[in-house]
Image (cartoon, rainbow, N blue to C red):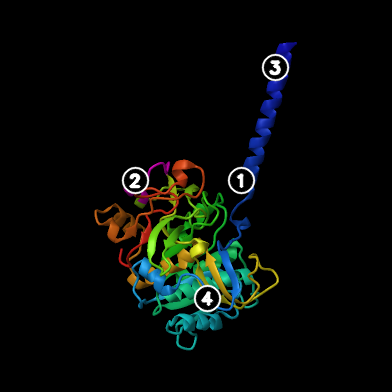
Amino acid sequence: MKNKIIIVVSILFLAIFVLFVSQNDIAEAAYRFSNFKGRPPVHISRSAQARPTGMTPNEIKKIYKLPATGGSGTIAIIDAYDDATIEKDLSVFDAAFGIIPCTVKNGCLEKHIMTSSTKTNSGWALETSLDVEWAHAIAPSAKILLIEAKTESGTNLLNAIDYAASRKDVVAISMSWGGAEFSDETDLDSHFASVSNAVFFASSGDDGWGASWPVSSPNVVGVGGTSLELLNDGTLVSESAWSGSGGGVSAYEIEPSYQKTYSIPKAGGKRAIPDVSYNADPQSGFPVYKTTGSTSSPQAGSSKNGWYELGGTSAGAPQWAAIQALGHSVSLSAIYKDKASTGTLAFFRDITSGSNGTCKYYCDARKRYDYVTGLGSPLTTKF
């Protein structure tokens, strides 16, 4: 009798296990690119203020050893929905920080709406304002091309990416949004190549440990997040890994050659994320001016107008894109070679403290490459 009970229990356990595995397989198979929706990883520290607060362009340039002026070529910004007031908002931002104006009339700003019937969305307008204003702040002489996808669906965002990739004037493409990986993502890697050899940049996400797309593509420079400790006068004391920085190992993308050559520990033959880092902590956030509003905002408080102070890895992608417009020398192969060289300290600030979770090795910052801040933060425009 005892043996029969053991057999019955074993059969039931096996059946439950098979059902669990099957359900997981079905769920994984069901989630594909057609289900993808982009989400901007932006955190609001202060909202709708009368005056700007947070890091100034001059302060961040000092920290990362970036020039006060410069930039050439076109920086393409990929976002969703129509930011109807972006030109006006950018003019307010420029005036506040003494930056040369960037308007449609003077040829600095171009807005390309993928579909004429595109609606507005306050949360995405906040992301758009961050991307456009800070890309212009870092590379004020470069042109800004804002490409607005109809919605945040994967198909619509990819159409906007394809348009940016078709432009011969584009030198950098910023994608400060992301979402969960999907099983057919490797089929889309060819979209991250342009006729002008523009460099693609994407945010690594703000949920701590974990991979996402499109940053997981081996053709995209992934930008993780750091925290800055500053004196009252803005002088840098230290830079550490930000707890929200996305990072990890892709579930689907194989390890690219530039990472194999560098020899990243514990990658297991898969794409390691991120590649580089930048300030993302909302406590040392970026001032952004925004006035486009809607009633369907994905960000609490973002339907109000005025100055915001924002953090998140979405701040790093457009600013790294601007660094490419300044130096025209960023590439995935170049930055890994620079980090491996004896002169690595001339290229990157190595982030060796902080973490983004409790997964030990994969969640802790350390010397050389780590899965939270990648190779480190920029100290030059020439790589």
* Mark 2 neighbour class, 10 Å CA radius: few under 14, some 14 to 19, many 20 or more: few
Q: Amino acid at mark 2?
A: Ser
Q: Amino acid at mark 3?
A: Ile
Distance from disc 3 to disc 4, alpha carbons, whole Å, reads: 69 Å
Give the residue at mark 1.
28
Q: Earlier in the sequence, mark 3 or mark 1?
A: 3
Q: Nearer the viewer, residue 103 or 195?
A: 103
Q: Amino acid at mark 4?
A: Pro
Give the residue at mark 2.
263
Inspect this view and state whether residue 162 appears. Answer: yes
Give the residue at mark 3.
6
Where does residue 206 sit, x and y in percent of width and height?
54, 57
What residue span does the magenta drawing correspond to? 259-269
> Helix, strand, or loop for circle 4?
loop
The residue shown at (62%, 50%) is 31
Where does residue 332 sit, x and y in percent of width and height?
37, 58
